[in-house]
Image (cartoon, rainbow, N blue to C red):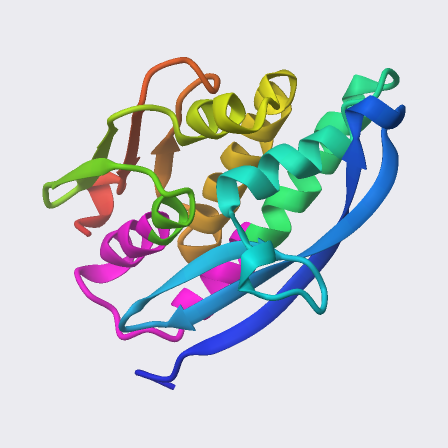
Amino acid sequence: MDGVNHRRPLLTYPITSGLMCYAVVNERTVYLQGAPEAGFRLYGQMPGGSEASSVNLAEVLLEFAMAWNAPGDMSEARRQMQIFGRRLGEALADQRAQAKPVNGVLGRAADALEDVLRSLDASFARRQTESEVHYQLDRSPLHIAAEVTGLEREAELAHHVFNAICQSLVSAIDPELHIQLPGGPNQGCTISVRAPVSNGR
């Protein structure tokens, strides 16, 4: 499989319009594309659409959040964010499991998180020690995307999806890894993954 660029549809979600009482106006499919050696990318594209209909992962998360941000049960909305994020994270982890291990599970988790950050078009710096990987982002990619698209109201729910992606991704690679994430779309821009000191990885 190494070196082969695969494109895999993961799920399809509705696109709603806040100007039309959250009526469904279209749909978009989330794809996972890439190869273990070169890296993967999560992005959205309208079924049957050209590349012009593609959006990065940040806009995918904001659009999905909008579909559940209508007045109503916010606990159910957060549950749906969790389910959506977990499915994306586990799908990416499954593909990453086929890559040759580099620097053990911590290295694999770091590579997978970079797939997520690149999918968000995030600008970041990576520092790594034997037991921890630390990312410093210039700005929150969700906050930037929300400003560009005008979906600021959706940023908080979208952040729940982002957290679910990262947490499920790291846990699927190794449940003993510990990940620390920003508390919200506008709170800090650091992410770290730490291996248990006792296991020597």
Side of 61 relative to 118 (left or right): right
For the residue pair 191 and 144, the one nearer the viewer reads as: 144
- The image shows a total of numbered marks equal to 0
Side of 87 relative to 21 (left or right): left
Q: Is residue 98 magenta?
A: yes
Q: Is residue 48 above or below residue 3?
A: above
Q: Is residue 82 magenta?
A: no
Q: Residue at x 28, y 50 (%)?
A: 110
Q: Residue at x 40, y 31 (%)?
A: 141
Q: What secondary structure prevails in the magenta region? A: helix
Q: Position of residue 31 (x, y in %)?
A: 57, 63
For the N terminus, the image quarter is bottom left
Q: Residue at x 79, y 24 (%)?
A: 18
Side of 37 relative to 179 (left or right): left
Q: Residue at x 76, y 23 (%)?
A: 69
Q: Is residue 201 above or below residue 21?
A: below
Residue 103 location, quadrant: bottom left
For the residue pair 94 and 152, the one nearer the viewer reads as: 152
Q: Is residue 110 above or below residue 141?
A: below
Q: Is residue 125 above or below residue 88?
A: above
Q: Position of residue 62 (x, y in %)?
A: 61, 33
Give the magenta range: 89-114
Q: Is residue 42 visible?
A: yes
Q: Position of residue 34 (x, y in %)?
A: 40, 70
